[in-house]
Image: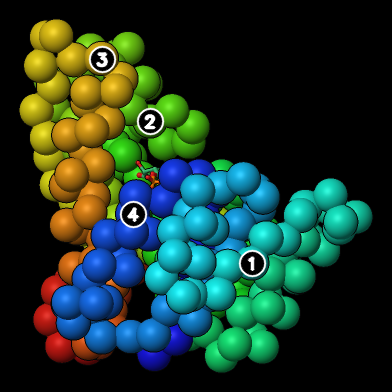
Amino acid sequence: MNLAVLASGYGSNLQAIINAIHKGEIRANLAVVISDREDAYALQRAKDHGIEALFLNPRDYPGRDAYDRGIIEQLRLRGVDLVILAGFMRLLTPRFVAEFRGKIMNIHPSLLPAFPGLEGVKQALDYGVKVSGCTVHFVDEGLDTGPIILQEAVPVFDNDTEETLHQRIHAVEHRLYPRAIQLLIEGKLRLEGRRCFLGAT
Ligand code: GRF
């Protein structure tokens, strides 16, 4: 199976995925890392590991739909079967979702459906929750609304800042995301409506 990771930023989840591939915990080929930001450290991480790093500048395209078609074209050229969003800061168009339905995953730093969208960690902290966490989910047309694959909770402490809480969540993400990816690769994710069950398909 050929994977692509789409990332806009630091890429620590990308790093966790690369590490898992090296350890044989994800049995797939990471064909390309694509970013909408030229300065994304994720691109550097890819290069450091000999993985193709591709910057696609949204300004080179007339609009969102054209940009997403540009990404789809690059994915098709490389025979990508599974698209992994890892801190990709753009909402995919319905066309993109339709093209890879059931083959796009995202990770979000809250227990969805709480605190979707931008700054999930800050939203949770500001709300005053005592428990937060992270969610791996399939991507549909909505904002962080697709069927949930895996979730794990982390405690929120009184002295937490956005940074310390995000750090705690990141540590869990780095374990959860590779696991979810490998489950899909092994055909062990079964969808019934919104519910995703773990077991043979
Ligand atoms: C993660 O917290 C993820 O949940 C969210 O964006 C962040 C990306 O972090 N979607 P990184 O770039 O993988 O370090």
Q: Secondary structure at mark 3?
A: loop
Closer to the observer: label 4 or label 2?
A: 4
Are dots 2 and 1 in contact, CB under 8 Å? Answer: no
**Looking at numbered disc 1 in the image, what kind of residue is underneath it?**
Leu
Q: Which residue is mark 3?
A: 161
Residue 150 lies in quadrant:
bottom left
In the rendered view of the protein, which quadrant contains the N terminus? bottom left
Q: Which residue is mark 4?
A: 13
Q: Is residue 69 left or right of residue 168?
A: right
CA–CA distance between discs 2 and 1?
27 Å
Closer to the observer: label 2 or label 3?
A: 3
Q: Which residue is mark 2?
A: 120
Residue 94 lies in quadrant:
bottom right
Could one spot residue 23 in this view of the protein? yes
Which residue is painted at 67% across and 60% down in the image? 55
Which quarter is ligand 1 in?
Answer: top left
The mark nearer the N terminus, 3 or 1, is 1
The location of residue 193, given as percent across then percent down, is 33, 68
CA–CA distance between discs 2 and 3?
13 Å
- Mark 4 C-beta to ligand 1 under 8 Å: yes
